[in-house]
Amino acid sequence: MWRPAVGLPPRLALSVLAGPGRSCFLGSGSATRKDWQAKNRRSFSDFYMQPLFDPDLEESPFFAPKSRSDPTRYVACKKLARNLVRNLLGYNCNPSRQLILECNPGPGILTEALLRAGASVIAFQNEKSFIPHLKSLRRKLNGLLQVVPSDFFKIDPRHQEVLKPEYNSSVIFQSLGIDPVPWSAGVPIKVFGILPSKFERRILWKNVFDLYSCESIFRYGRIELNLFVTEKEFQRLIATPKRPDLYQVLSVLWQVACEIKFIQMEPWSSFGAYTENECSEDSKLRESCSSLKQNLYFVQMTPRRTLFTEHLSPLNYDIFFHMVKHCFGKRSSSIIQHLRSLSTVEPIEILRQVRIRPGQTILNMYPQDFKRLFETIERSEDSVFKWVYDESLEDIIG
């Protein structure tokens, strides 16, 4: 089983993921493209792994202060709040044991409903004007509420050299007395949030990286995400080869990682919105922001207990990511072409084992097919090296 490769440089850590010599880096001195061509190993063609730039992971001013044109939504309808309580708590006979992390609750309509149902709530609220009211709820309802003055969607930012304590999940969770639980245990925490439409794709990318690497909130176990997303992102999340126009890398990664359950669609009128230093509960702000005039889709994303295996783990997930991204980079190419550029293992035998025809394209492969393919290559004994890398892999995986 996987164990952390502690204290190793990134490249060396990658090279010892599953034993000695499991990968070779093109251009690193271990083996170069020229070397592979000279040896004519399985007739490697010019179909080489290319750096796949991902605009969703590009460095950007994501952590810059919000402007008035960047509103944040919150639950403003008591009927919706009651429905959400039922969905979040289910038939839990002891709601007090259920911990809910609520993101940007605004005036706390859902917060109060959860507290009255007996749940313990941690409210991450970065809008200071709402905090006094949230704290009054704590005094009124038996202290089952803790308020964290921070934006949950900005904790543990990637590409951030200096991490402020208010955005460090380890510091926050330790202060809250939250301890990690084994991945095989149940769901210890449920997160509820409404993704800001401007950044929802970036947040989904960050969280899928955190999930597979067991970093950030996922250090604490199989954290369940209960999110409102736009229709566009919802359709992408659940897309399969039946919808090739929507099927993409994120579709595969999230569906492999989680059981995704659609709960309900909610009209935008059920939500309020506020901007930095300015709060509003009326409809004028919503009407002035076209981005808010969208119905939202409520989805429950529960990490699979069986996600990690001997052959897919937090130590080699990045290779799996790169395999999927590479395949979607050239959708029209056959899967055997992709394998010949990605791996040193004999592709015909691998495809026979996973029952995939060599001429198929990735648009014939469902998300779990990618996982089976990856794990089959990982456990193959056909070659000392399993994967061929480009030096730029570290940049690709963010």
Image (cartoon, rainbow, N blue to C red):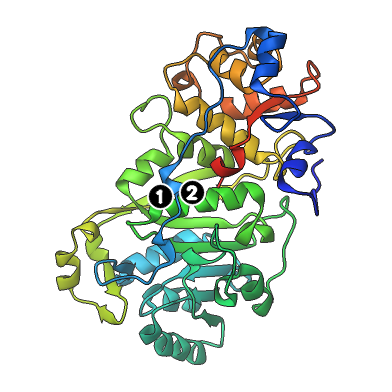
Which structural element holds mark 2?
Answer: helix
User: What residue do we see at 66% from left, 53% from top?
Assistant: 214
Mark 1 nearby-residue class (10 Å; few <14, some 14–19, many ≥20): some
- The disc at residue 102 is none
- 3D distance between C-alphas at marks 1 and 2: 6 Å
User: What residue do we see at 36% from left, 60% from top?
Assistant: 196
Give x and y (percent) for residue 215: 65, 56
Mark 2 nearby-residue class (10 Å; few <14, some 14–19, many ≥20): some
Give x and y (percent) for residue 138: 50, 87
Q: Amino acid at mark 2?
A: Trp
User: What residue do we see at 36% from left, 45% from top?
Assistant: 233
Residue occupied by mark 2:
205
Q: Foreground: 196 or 261?
A: 196
- The disc at residue 201 is 1
State how many labels appear: 2
In the displayed structure, does residue 89 sit left or right of residue 320? left
Q: Foreground: 133 or 124?
A: 124
Q: Are marks 1 and 2 in contact (CB under 8 Å)?
A: yes
Q: Quadrant of residue 256?
A: top right
Q: Does any portion of residue 284 appear in the rendered image?
A: yes
Q: Amino acid at mark 1?
A: Arg
Q: Foreground: 346 or 109?
A: 346
Is 261 placed above or below 61 here? above
Which structural element holds mark 1?
Answer: helix
Give x and y (percent) for residue 344: 70, 18
Give x and y (percent) for residue 137: 45, 87
